[in-house]
């Protein structure tokens, strides 16, 4: 089709949005993504692994991106409305590009659906895997898997702090990002501006983690922690991803390495804008209400797990029990998904606690997923206000966050988000239960609920056979498709995807 | 005595408190006092069947004395305002079941000798839930069985008044949702007056419907259409049917009866699930449009049809039933569970996982607002869908101001917010309840799957009754530990009061001046 014809079709007057402009932006982003394949290519050359899958994938991605960009014409004038389409499509296509090397050259992921699942799990920094034999991957393929999470995490920081607030998803007040300029700028400009600043922080933190883990390896504190492992785990910690080249996740590593991971997961689950401000202006981040609640929730979760682990005689009192309960709580609540022990074999109470933590998530503006702490904070405040107003009818009580009044529209959007999230979670659990029963798969309700929560919240591991040391491979193709959708929707905070399904979005 | 009264009054009269707790207690005591009259019916039944009468007389005596004594202690002036209303409804629904449980304990009924089980049974009755701690219902005295059924009927009566007269005035449930035109613009009036006024009109409708149902069921029995339907059964099922309760004197619920009876019962519970204000306008004021043009009623019918259709599909596909039987069992179960009644014409726990899931989802739908049904209620789902759609539209069209309408009338934003708050609290309490059951079941070494625990919590919070697993429609809640039984009784209480009146009591602002 000629360029003119395509444009004419898409720009027909009946549409209210600039589809061409949105596609152009998607094309450009996908084009840049092709550069990412250079990294595994170098690694492959170094380890003597085959590099052709990455070169081929890079070429296909670049050709697709260029093609899309040439066929459309955009410039930077696309507005917030086109942003929904661009964001949604980009995440879908980026995962597709990332799945190419798997499809081309990985025995366990020959099935395109499995490959796409693995790639979506990577790009959305979920960490759920359909692989059954991770050590069978060559170094390069394993590192590519880790690297997709790092790329996804980068995208999420930009998405969470720069794109979504401008699309009125997530709400500006929640992040209190003072970094970017006024809202009236074209979307792409302000995104680029914010992205540049956060890029540095994200890369810096990753570098720091690689360094610390490598030092642990060099000094012999953790002989297993080679520089390769250090890089692989730093790539999936900062984006709160959770992939590991180790079949038993973080379990084989020494206590020191696990403590370092805990610390970095904590950092990755907090608001990056807050980190930035804390570093630049030396403000005290503990004055932030969200961060305080985040820490309190982590502490409460850890305490419950710690007591239950002692009660059930799974670990003896001491550093080990503290470490394992803290590790699991931090990993699950920040939606990372590492495991330092197989929590799927623990008790019902620990499983339920972890499912609740899966629904909480990290802070807004972090790389974590799920509902996010600040939303829970505001929903709590809203419910209290609602009860107060039930009695004191005439009282007008504004809801404040960090001393500032949050406007009513933002509050409504948060409530709606919370309910849509729960709705999707329930529907997901039901569909997974029913589908598993149909496919003759032994899946308990807890596992189905956990699987829906873990994919929608971009956490990673679930329970049963899809536990932290297990695999999602046994699920039926349809169930995997549902999980891919949940990961995608969860990462985009549902609304951009849901908006595309309304008729009014497309109307003039 | 006088000195003591004065002392009590000083302690709980306003001063430091912003709520007139004494007046609230006085009203609660009045209700409890009236309850004593209710024991006359089972006493008469006991006389007729030659069973011991004294448990009911003693229970009536205890109730009357307590009611009068507390009433005297709390003084005579009734100055109950809206704010006291929360306390009144919460306490009434907590205490009435306690007094209602006395006959179970006194009658020396082995199955209910544990006070918590008796309280559970009574709470299940007065909240019109229908969950039972009994294993063999038919072993009970007829009078005790009838008291069980009657407690649901009384509870149902209370619920209609609660849902239509009290809660909307307390800003729970929202006036707009009911569009009550029955009672005048009475927000400024004293609470008791308006309640009395509304109650008088609804009383008529409620009693009328019950009488009609007794008549229809009795005719089915007399005409020989269904030999199992005795007059006793007709009365018993009409009591728990119109109240959307679900208790049955039969161990096999309504599976003990023929097809004609089951169809008749389905029709009546479907009617009882409609907003009573609209039924009043239909039957008494002869305005059929009041019902047929109502958006909630239409969605209610659509959901009943969809639920029945889905169940039918699953029953036929699973090869469980065929023909009329399949249709009947699908419709009975879907209607009974969605309206939160809890009758069962077959043991649905033996059906497929998909059927179980469908029923679990229906438990969250509930009947119409202003009916005797429980759960979230259709109108809230309707508004929730509209709120979500508006939210998505406003994400794109930022400046658009889109009001949400119900039957063409704009619903105010505060009512909408309270709908969302209610649903959020409902889900939160469900989750806490389910977790509590799982944890406690493990402690008490009771075998329960997560699904069954969620089902039991949903069935009690939604005032449905039967759940899954051992707590299924032909089963019993008896295996649960005492603590779990207590949790479930609490869930029934919260669900019946639509949570917010109780939640309000827990805020500091409520008690302050």
Image (cartoon, coloured by chain):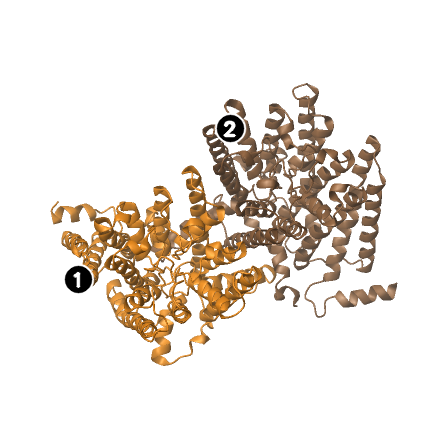
**In the rendered view, would you say A338 is above or below B260?**
below
Question: Which residue is at 49% across, 40% downward?
Answer: B357
Labels 2 & 1 near each other (Cβ < 8 A): no
Question: Which residue is at 58% across, 63% downward?
Answer: A388
Of B387 and B106, which appears nearest the observer? B106
The chain shown in brown is which?
Answer: B
At which x and y percent is residue B386?
Answer: 44, 48
**Label annotation for residue A318:** none
Question: Which residue is at 72% across, 62% downward?
Answer: B20
Q: Are marks 2 and 1 on the same chain?
A: no
| Chain letter of the residue beneath label 2 in the structure image | B
Quarter of the figure that contains the C terminus of chain B: bottom right
**Going by the picture, which residue comes out furthest to the bottom?**
A282
Locate residue A273 relative to residue A96 in the image: left or right: right
**In the rendered view, would you say A274 is above or below B381?**
below
**Going by the picture, which residue comes out furthest to the left?**
A2
Residue linked to disc 1: A45
The 10 Å Cα crowd at callout 1, few under 14, some 14 to 19, many 20 or more, is few
The 10 Å Cα crowd at callout 2, few under 14, some 14 to 19, many 20 or more, is some
Is residue B190 visible to the viewer in this orientation of the structure? no
The chain shown in orange is which?
Answer: A
The residues bearing labels 2 and 1 have C-alpha atoms spaced at a distance of 62 Å
At which x and y percent is residue A137?
Answer: 27, 55
| Chain letter of the residue beneath label 1 in the structure image | A
Of A168 and A436, which appears nearest the observer? A436
**In the rendered view, would you say B182 is above or below A248?**
above
Of A264 and B506, which appears nearest the observer? A264
Is residue B511 visible to the viewer in this orientation of the structure? yes
**Label annotation for residue B320:** 2
């Amino acid at each position: 089709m000629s360029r003119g014809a395509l444009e004419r079709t898409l720009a027909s007057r009946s549409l209210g949005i600039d589809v061409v402009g949105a596609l152009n932006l998607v094309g450009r982003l996908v084009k840049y993504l092709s550069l990412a394949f250079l990294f595994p290519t170098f690694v492959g050359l170094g380890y003597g692994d085959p590099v052709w899958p990455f070169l081929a994938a890079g070429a296909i991605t670049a050709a697709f991106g260029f093609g899309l960009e040439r066929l459309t014409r955009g410039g930077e004038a696309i507005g917030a409305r086109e942003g929904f389409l661009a964001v949604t499509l980009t995440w879908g296509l980026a995962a597709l590009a990332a799945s190419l090397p798997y499809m081309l050259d990985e025995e366990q992921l020959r099935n395109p659906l499995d490959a796409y699942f693995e790639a979506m799990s990577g790009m959305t920094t979920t960490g759920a895997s359909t692989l059954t034999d991770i050590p069978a991957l060559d170094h390069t393929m394993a590192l590519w898997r880790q690297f997709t999470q790092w790329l996804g995490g980068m995208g999420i920081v930009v998405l969470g702090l720069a794109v979504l607030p401008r699309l009125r998803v997530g709400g500006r007040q929640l992040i209190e990002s003072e970094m970017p300029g006024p809202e009236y700028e074209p979307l792409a400009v302000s995104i680029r501006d914010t992205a540049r600043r956060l890029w540095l922080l994200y890369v810096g933190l990753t570098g720091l983690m690689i360094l610390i883990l490598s030092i642990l390896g060099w000094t012999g504190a953790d002989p297993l922690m080679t520089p390769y492992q250090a890089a692989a785990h730093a790539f999936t910690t900062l984006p709160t991803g959770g992939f590991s080249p180790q079949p038993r996740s973080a379990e084989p590593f020494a206590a020191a390495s696990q403590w370092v991971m805990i610390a970095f997961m904590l950092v990755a689950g907090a608001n990056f804008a807050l980190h930035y401000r804390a570093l630049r202006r030396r403000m005290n981040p503990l004055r932030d209400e969200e961060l305080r609640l985040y820490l309190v929730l982590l502490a409460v979760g850890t305490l419950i797990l710690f007591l239950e682990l002692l009660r059930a005689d799974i670990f003896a009192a001491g550093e080990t029990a503290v470490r394992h309960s803290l590790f699991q709580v931090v990993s699950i609540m920040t939606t990372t998904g590492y495991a330092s022990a197989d929590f799927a074999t623990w008790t019902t109470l620990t499983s339920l606690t972890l499912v609740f933590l899966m629904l909480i998530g990290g802070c807004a503006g972090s790389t974590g997923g799920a509902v996010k702490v600040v939303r829970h904070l505001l929903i709590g405040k809203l419910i209290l206000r609602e009860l107060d107003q039930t009695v004191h009818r005439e009282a007008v009580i504004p809801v404040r966050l960090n001393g500032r009044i949050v406007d009513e529209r933002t509050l409504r959007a948060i409530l709606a988000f919370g309910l849509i999230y729960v709705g999707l979670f329930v529907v997901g659990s039901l569909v997974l239960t029913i589908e598993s029963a149909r496919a003759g798969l032994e899946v308990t309700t807890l596992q189905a609920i956990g699987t829906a929560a873990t994919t929608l919240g971009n956490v990673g591991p679930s329970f049963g056979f899809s536990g932290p040391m297990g695999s999602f491979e046994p699920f039926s193709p349809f169930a995997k498709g549902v999980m891919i959708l949940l990961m995608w929707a969860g990462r985009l905070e549902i609304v951009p995807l849901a908006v595309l399904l309304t008729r009014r979005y497309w109307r003039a | 005595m006088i000195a003591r009264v004065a002392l009590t009054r000083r302690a709980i009269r306003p001063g430091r408190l912003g709520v007139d707790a004494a007046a609230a207690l006085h009203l609660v005591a009045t209700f409890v006092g009236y309850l004593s009259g209710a024991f006359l019916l089972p006493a008469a039944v006991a006389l007729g069947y030659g069973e011991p009468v004294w448990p009911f007389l003693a229970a009536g005596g205890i109730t009357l004395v307590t009611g009068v004594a507390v009433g005297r202690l709390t003084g005579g002036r009734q100055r109950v305002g809206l704010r006291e209303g929360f306390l009144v409804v919460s306490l009434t629904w907590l205490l009435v079941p306690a007094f209602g449980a006395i006959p179970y304990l006194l009658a020396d009924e082995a199955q209910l000798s544990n006070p918590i089980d008796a309280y559970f049974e009574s709470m299940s009755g007065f909240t019109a839930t229908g969950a039972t701690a009994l294993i063999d219902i038919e072993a009970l005295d007829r009078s005790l069985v009838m008291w069980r059924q009657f407690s649901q009927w009384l509870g149902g009566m209370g619920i209609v008044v609660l849902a239509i007269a009290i809660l909307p005035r307390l800003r729970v449930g929202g006036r707009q949702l009911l569009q009550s035109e029955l009672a005048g613009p009475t927000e400024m009036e004293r609470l008791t007056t308006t309640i009395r006024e509304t109650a008088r009109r609804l009383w008529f409708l409620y009693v009328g419907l019950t009488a009609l149902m007794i008549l229809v069921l009795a005719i089915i029995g007399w005409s020989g259409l269904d030999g199992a339907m005795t007059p006793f059964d007709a009365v018993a099922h009409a009591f728990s049917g119109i109240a959307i309760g679900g208790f049955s004197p039969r161990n096999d619920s309504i599976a003990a009866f023929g097809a004609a009876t089951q169809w008749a019962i389905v029709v009546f519970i479907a009617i009882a699930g409609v907003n009573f204000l609209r039924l009043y306008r239909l039957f008494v004021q002869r305005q059929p449009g009041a019902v047929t043009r109502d958006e909630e009623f239409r969605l209610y019918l659509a959901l009943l049809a969809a639920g029945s259709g889905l169940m039918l599909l699953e029953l036929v596909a699973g090869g469980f039933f065929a023909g009329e039987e399949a249709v009947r069992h699908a419709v009975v179960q879907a209607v009974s569970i969605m309206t939160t009644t809890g009758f069962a014409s077959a043991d649905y726990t033996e059906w497929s996982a998909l059927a179980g899931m469908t029923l679990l989802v229906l438990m969250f739908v509930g009947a119409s607002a202003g009916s005797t049904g429980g759960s979230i209620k259709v109108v809230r789902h309707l508004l929730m869908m509209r709120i979500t759609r508006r939210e998505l539209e406003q994400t794109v069209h930022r400046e658009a101001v889109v009001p949400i309408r119900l039957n063409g009338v704009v619903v105010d934003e505060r009512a909408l917010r309270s709908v969302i708050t209610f649903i959020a609290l409902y889900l939160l309490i469900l989750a806490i309840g389910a977790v509590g059951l799982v944890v406690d079941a493990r402690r008490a070494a009771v075998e329960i799957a997560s699904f069954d625990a969620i089902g039991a919590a949903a069935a009690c919070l939604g005032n449905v009754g039967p759940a899954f697993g051992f707590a299924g429609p032909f089963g019993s809640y008896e295996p649960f530990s005492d603590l779990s039984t207590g949790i479930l009784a609490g869930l029934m209480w919260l669900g019946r009061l639509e949570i917010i009146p109780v939640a309000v009591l827990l805020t500091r602002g409520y008690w302050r001046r």
